[in-house]
Structures are given as structure tokens and as C-alpha cells.
Image (cartoon, rainbow, N blue to C red):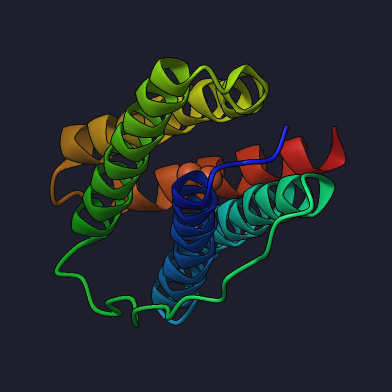
Amino acid sequence: MKLPTDLVQNLNEQLNRELYAQYFYLVMASYFLEKELKGFGRFFLKQSKEEGEHALRLFSYLMEKGVPFHPLPLEIPPKNYETPLACFQAAYEYEQKVTLSYYNLLKKVRDMGEYDTEEFLWWYIREQREEENLMQGWVHKLTLIGEDAVGLLVLDKEAGEAAEKEESD
Ligand SMILES: [Fe+2]
Ligand SMILES: [Fe+2]
């Protein structure tokens, strides 16, 4: 079934949100790498790469459905954060925003009876749950250590090892 035009627009907007996440996390990776916090840097590089894959999955869906990809402008992500915690909080907030956008779209496709797209979107709903959990976990740990520099170095190491482990899995 041919996708309605407004749904094509919505899917293009989701793609743009994923591309923005890729860019956002790349900037966050630079924030940490430039501070010699290489573990967090590696963590955000991995997240950035994953967001790019989320965008490509949407791109493939548009192509499969024979509908156009509309390039949309990308905002410039913020670069400076007061603390590592503030950076992770911004990532967590963005993930929640993206989750909400998928919820709204899911509701819309259900009401329209676009079950094919509904099935496609469920993958993103599950992915968002994982990513929210991940970011929330880091926000929690960084909150626990407060201003403790040694604690920060321990978490940096842990984040780097976790990113490396997932990459080799
Ligand atoms: Fe994503
Ligand atoms: Fe994400």
C-alpha cells in the first residue's frame, strides 16, 4: 500500500531526529575526548554510530515503500556543558523527546490503519526503551559521584569498557 503524503513527511522527520542524534552524540564525544575522558568519548562515538544506523533504517523503509526522502536541515548541537552529568542529562532528555515522537507517530499510524508502518515502528519503540535506560543509568551514576574526580575516572573507564565490549559482541 502506498504511504499517505503526511506519513511520508512524518517518517522523514523521524529520520531527521535520528540524524540529529548522530550529530548531537558526535559533538558530545568531542566534548569528552577533548577533556581526555576517553571512555565517555568512546561511549558517545558508539551511540553516534548507532543513531546513524537508525536513520539508515528509516531511509531504507522509504526506499522500500517507493516514497521520497526529503533532506531537512540539521540544527547545530550544543558543544559546551557545565559538567559531564549535564551532558548525559541532555542526552537523556533528547532520548525521551524522541521516544515521545515515536509514540505520537505510532498512535497516528494505528488510527490510520497503516499496520505495515506500525510494525516497522515497533523496532524503534523497543530501541528507545533501551536507550532511555542506558542514559538514565549514567545520569544516576554521575549523580551519585557528585564532584568526586576519582569517581569520574572510574566511571569513564567503565563507560569505555562497556562501549568496547558491545562493539566486539
Ligand atoms: Fe535512535
Ligand atoms: Fe537514541
Residue 93 image offset from top left, x and y in percent: 24, 45
Q: Nearer the viewer, residue 76 or 67?
A: 67
Q: Residue at x 75, y 37 (%)?
A: 165
Q: Residue at x 30, y 49 (%)?
A: 94
Residue 91 image offset from top left, x and y in percent: 33, 51
Q: Residue at x 65, y 59 (%)?
A: 52
Is 146 situated above or below 19? Answer: above
Query: Which corner quadrant holds the N terminus?
Result: top right
Is 124 situated above or below 30? Answer: above
Q: Residue at x 83, y 46 (%)?
A: 64
Question: Relative to 146, is 155 on the left or the right?
Answer: right
Is 46 situated above or below 35? Answer: above
Query: Which corner quadrant holds the C terminus?
Result: top right
So how many labels did they put on this image?
0
Q: Nearer the viewer, residue 92 or 5?
A: 5
Residue 81 image offset from top left, x and y in percent: 20, 70
Residue 2 image offset from top left, x and y in percent: 69, 40
